[in-house]
């Protein structure tokens, strides 16, 4: 079994007056775990269904290993789909559900039995072969659906939010199992999800989508650390957004006038110049919170404020700090750090600081 490349060029899709996809182009590499990530209604499932053959695009081209697959029916595309609702046959056993695609091909019984048991062992369900779906947990049903999709030995496996019906703990466990299955079989996975943590955990690369457009494609680290737009920055985890105008340049950083908030130092201008309006982002875990009076380093961005709210979240605490300008900054402090934020609470006066290297310009306008 081996993966395949997927080439998506200029795909559009309209449902009446609503344009679900607006000229989407992507190149998915052989054997890659590739995620389509975005909010509900962004077009990610529509794009997956077009690859699988369950929707026809209004225009554009889809290729698998260089072959135009749009004229082909779903069963001829070397791509199988795992649906959100499992789509298992309730009257058939686990064994017969997995065997069903092979029975359509009239595979000899001995070969069929060997293949079915191989894939049941792969998803750790060989001890449940005689059970019916009603006797299985949600996670077990999902593994049956995955085994049934893999038994056809496709080059591409399409997964449409396969874990959304599971509770949080089981979803995390199944996600790790899915990643292990991908490593074992080596085919191309295209995974649709609206859950940022899922995509960041298992993907080789991610395409972030919104309103029918692909906004950014990159590795999880690139998407998280260097978002290309305000939407990407806010959708992938939590962040602080600051608007301002580049006031000066030269030396070690650019200085952005953020209005009443004050001046913010930035080391990555991304081609913007003095006078340009820009939007900055800085992640909450990059910020340091200390009691007022404990000086920050000279190179830091540093602001005084009051703790509006502190939230204990197990392994970390979240602080919402209202600066003197009225702006609210989110600060995450992981427990166990040797930080000076220990014991801070509501209405405490504090200093919030961060390194200019951790501030990124995500959008801007010339002049």
Image: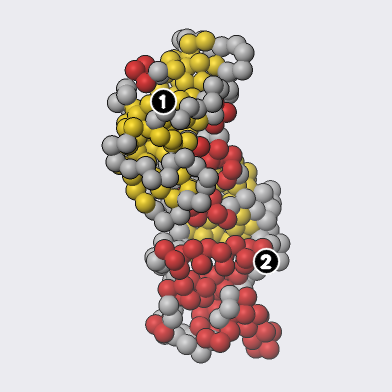
Is 111 displayed left or right of 350 in the figure? right
SS at badge 2: helix
Residue 106 occupies quadrant: bottom right
Q: Residue furthest front?
A: 293
Instruction: Residue 284 in the image: state x and y as whole percent.
Output: 45, 38
Q: Which mark is residue 185?
A: 2
Tag nearer the camera, 2 or 1: 1
Residue 8 occupies quadrant: top right
Task: Report the Cα–Cα distance between label 2 and label 1.
Answer: 52 Å
Is 110 displayed left or right of 161 in the figure? right
Is residue 146 at all visible to an observer of this figure? yes
Question: At 60% from the left edge and 47% from the top edge, which residue is drawn?
Answer: 205
Instruction: Residue 358 in the image: state x and y as whole percent.
Output: 54, 31
Q: Residues within 10 Å of mark 1 (few under 14, many from 20)?
A: many
Is residue 102 at all visible to an observer of this figure? no
For the residue pair 88 and 366, the one nearer the viewer reads as: 366
Is 331 displayed left or right of 175 in the figure? left
Question: At 62% from the left edge and 13% from the top edge, which residue is drawn?
Answer: 251
Q: Circle 1 is placed at which residue position?
A: 303
Q: Residues within 10 Å of mark 2 (few under 14, many from 20)?
A: some
For the residue pair 222 and 155, the one nearer the viewer reads as: 222
């Amino acid at each position: 079994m081996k993966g395949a490349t997927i080439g998506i060029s200029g795909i559009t899709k309209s449902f009446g007056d609503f344009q679900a996809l607006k000229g989407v182009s992507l190149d998915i590499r052989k054997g890659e775990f590739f995620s389509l990530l975005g909010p509900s209604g962004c077009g990610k499932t529509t794009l997956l269904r077009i690859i699988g053959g369950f929707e026809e695009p209004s225009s554009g081209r889809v290729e698998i290993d260089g072959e135009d697959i749009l004229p082909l029916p779903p069963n001829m595309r070397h791509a199988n789909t795992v649906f959100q609702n499992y789509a298992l046959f309730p009257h058939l056993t686990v064994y017969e559900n997995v065997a069903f695609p092979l029975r359509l091909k009239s595979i000899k019984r001995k070969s069929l039995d060997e293949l079915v048991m191989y894939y049941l062992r792969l998803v750790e369900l060989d001890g449940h072969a005689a059970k019916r779906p009603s006797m299985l947990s949600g996670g077990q049903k999902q593994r049956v659906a995955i085994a049934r999709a893999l038994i056809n030995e496709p080059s591409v496996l399409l997964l449409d939010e396969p874990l959304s019906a599971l509770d949080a703990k089981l979803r995390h466990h199944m996600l790790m199992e899915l990643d292990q299955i991908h490593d074992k079989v080596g085919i191309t996975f295209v995974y649709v999800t609206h859950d940022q943590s899922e995509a960041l955990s298992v993907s080789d690369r991610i395409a972030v989508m919104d309103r029918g457009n692909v906004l950014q494609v990159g590795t999880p680290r690139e998407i998280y650390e260097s978002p290309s737009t305000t939407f990407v920055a806010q959708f992938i985890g939590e962040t602080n957004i600051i608007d301002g105008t580049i006031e000066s340049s030269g030396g070690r950083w650019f200085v952005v006038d953020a209005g009443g908030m004050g001046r913010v130092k930035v080391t990555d201008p991304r081609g913007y110049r003095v006078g340009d309006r820009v939007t900055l982002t800085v992640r909450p875990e990059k910020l340091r919170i200390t009691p007022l009076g404990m000086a920050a380093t000279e190179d830091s961005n540093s602001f005084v404020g009051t703790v509006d709210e502190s939230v204990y979240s197990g392994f970390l605490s979240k602080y919402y700090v209202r600066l003197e300008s009225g702006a609210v900054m989110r600060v995450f402090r992981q427990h166990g750090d040797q930080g000076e934020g220990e014991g801070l609470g509501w209405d405490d006066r504090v200093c919030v600081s961060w390194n200019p290297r951790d501030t990124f310009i995500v959008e801007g306008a010339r002049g």
